[in-house]
Image (tube, rainbow, N blue to C red):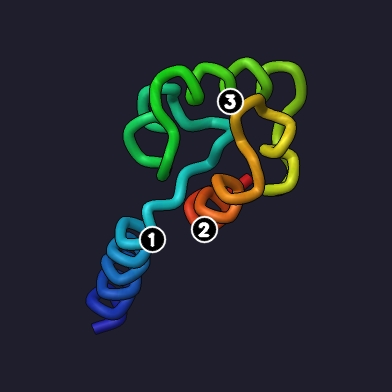
Amino acid sequence: MKKLTILALVLVTMATAKDLRVLNVNTAPVDSLALSLPGVGPAMAKRIDSARKVAPFKSCADLDAVKGIGVKKLEKLCASVVF
């Protein structure tokens, strides 16, 4: 019974994470950034990758330093990323 409870919790956690579609912007592959983040295409994903190589992002506000990410795009991204 205990194993079933643990398995159920793991499955619920996986489903929740999948539904939220959150990515770690410091570790996700460039193609995942482009495919999964709202308003981020291949060029923006490459700029995010270049910026994180200089210094890892510590908060959503740090993404503002990436060229092309303004206030509106930042609002959309914050719900989809972790650090």
User: Disc 1 on helix, strand or loop?
Assistant: helix
User: Disc 2 on helix, strand or loop?
Assistant: loop
**Is mark 1 in CB contact (under 8 Å) with mark 3?**
no
| C-alpha gap between disc 2 and disc 3 | 16 Å
Front one among 9 and 58: 58
Left or right of 39? Residue 19 is left
Identify the image quadrant of the C terminus: top right
**Mark sitting earlier along the chain (1/3):** 1
- At a point 65% along the width and 25% down the height, the residue shown is 67
Residue 33 position in % (x across, y down): 43, 32
Residue 75 position in % (x across, y down): 58, 55
Residue position marked by numbered label 1 in the rendering? 20
Front one among 8 and 49: 49
Residue position marked by numbered label 2 in the rendering? 79
| C-alpha gap between disc 1 and disc 2 | 8 Å
Residue position marked by numbered label 3 in the rendering? 48
